[in-house]
Image (spheres, rainbow, N blue to C red):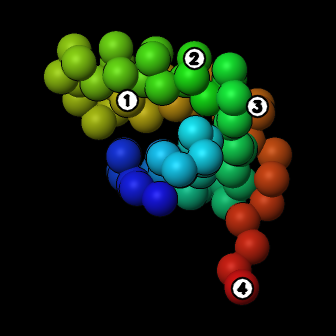
Amino acid sequence: MQIVYDSQHYHVIEYTGIGGYELTNKSEHVCAYFHGPAAAAFRDNFAKVIAENPSIDSVDEYLGGFDSLMTLPIVLH
């Protein structure tokens, strides 16, 4: 597990051993998990976004495009 992005509103965790990504919307307290082809597509597209050396607001805007997929409630345990 490695945090690959963290801002006031979002964070992205990569699960390298299993090829998954977890996206969290901190403001809404929800997350989504991508695995398999969806995770590979997210990784490739996210790498392109980061390669452009964007502002935090630009990355957050990109991640905001996934808000409708973030339906899993964040639960502390």
In front of the other: label 1 or label 4?
Answer: 4
- Which residue is found at the position 76% from the left and 33% from the top? 69
Identified at 29% across, 36% down, the residue is 56
Where residue 44 sits in the image (x, y, percent)? 45, 17
Q: Which residue is mark 2?
A: 41
Residue that appears at 69% across and 29% down: 36
Mark 3 vs 1, N-terminal side: 1
Residue type, numbered disc 1: Val
In the rendered structure, are the residues bearing label 4 and label 3 in contact, judged by CB atoms less than 8 Å apart?
Answer: no
Instruction: Report the disc number at residue 59.
Output: 1
> Is residue 36 visible from the viewing direction of this image?
yes
Q: What type is the residue that disc 3 sits on?
A: Ser
Question: Percent position (x, y) of residue 11?
Answer: 47, 50
Work out whether 50 lies above or below 14. above
Which residue bears the numbered disc 3? Answer: 68
Q: Tell me which amino acid carries mark 2.
A: Ala
Q: Residues within 10 Å of mark 1 (few under 14, many from 20)?
A: some
Residue 35: mark in rendering: none
Q: Element at badge 4?
A: loop
On the picture, is 27 further left or further right than 54? right
* Residue 77 appears left or right of 62: right
